[in-house]
Image: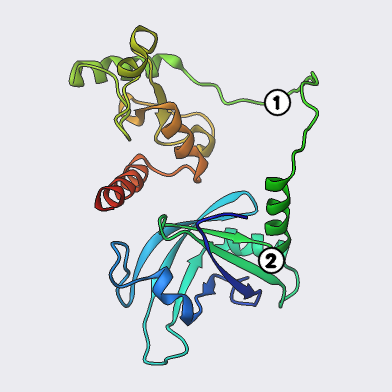
Amino acid sequence: MKHKYVIMPKKVNSSMKKDRITIDVKFHSIFNPPDSAFYVARKERRDIIICFNNKIFNGYYRYQGTKNSKQHLESIHYKSDLAGEIQKNFPSNGEDIYILFNPNKPNEFIIEKSYQQNLQQKLLKEDFEVQEGEITEETRKVIKRCNVIIKKAKEKFIQEHGSLYCEVCGFDFSKIYGELGKNFIEGHHKNPLCERNGQGKTKVADIALVCSNCHRMLHRMNNISVDILKNIIKNISRKDTNE
């Protein structure tokens, strides 16, 4: 499989099923190079996201430092949600696990099972097809939304800024799509409705106006905040500029 990732093989152990994965000393210069913009000084940390089993988890990378030449005491830390996922997928210690890291994306880590890598290689090399288009009926519960609050948020934003654009990345639909994109934007609840305990009041200030891409990203990463997504974009843009 062609990729930009550095792959660190590990064996599953008790620490991984609790809250951390230690970084082997030979990967220190890749995971935390001193001359990089994302360098983490001793006893400091950088927030990261971790992808495992097609799910996104929050965590942080920490470098504690030591005089021991064989161990730098640096590790990837995470909460019980990812620890539980690892326990479920690796019931026994000693199984193979792979940590993938792209130096161009220092805030992202991927955890893979060994057979998943082989499967990805196979899918990339072979043509395959699936059957789609079957019509089925579904019954499900949905959370009721009020479009009036989105309309009011748009009106207020236009009064203050003169036009509609994404509060995260600045994308303006009308500038790209002309008349078709005029006055188009999506409304994002800063306090997600799915996390509320029953019904509640929503104010205009509770709505962020965002483009479709940023809206999906906000919900993809465990409903992260607008400010966090802004910082992610800012850090990537800063790195691209430096390069």
Q: Position of residue 51 (x, y in %)?
A: 56, 54
Residue at 46% of width from left, 38% of height from top?
A: 217
Residue at 32% of width from left, 24% of height from top?
A: 204
Name the residue carrying label 2: 87
Q: Position of residue 80 (x, y in %)?
A: 57, 63
Is there a contact, CB below 8 Å, between mark 2 and mark 1?
A: no
Against 105, is 200 above or below? above
Q: Is residue 182 left or right of residue 48?
A: left
Pair 2/1: label in front: 2
Helix, strand or loop at label 1? It is: loop
Q: Position of residue 20 (x, y in %)?
A: 53, 71
Q: Position of residue 118 (x, y in %)?
A: 72, 58
Q: Amino acid at mark 1?
A: Arg
Viewer-proximal residue among 174 and 227: 174
Number of residues whose C-alpha sits closer than 10 Å to that of mark 2, classed few (under 14), some (14–19) or many (20 or more): some
- CA distance for labels 2 and 1: 31 Å
Name the residue carrying label 1: 140
Numbered badge on residue 157: none
Residue at 47% of width from left, 89% of height from top?
A: 70
Against 85, is 54 above or below? above
Q: Is residue 190 left or right of residue 163?
A: right
Viewer-proximal residue among 164 and 133: 133
Q: Quadrant of residue 134?
A: top right
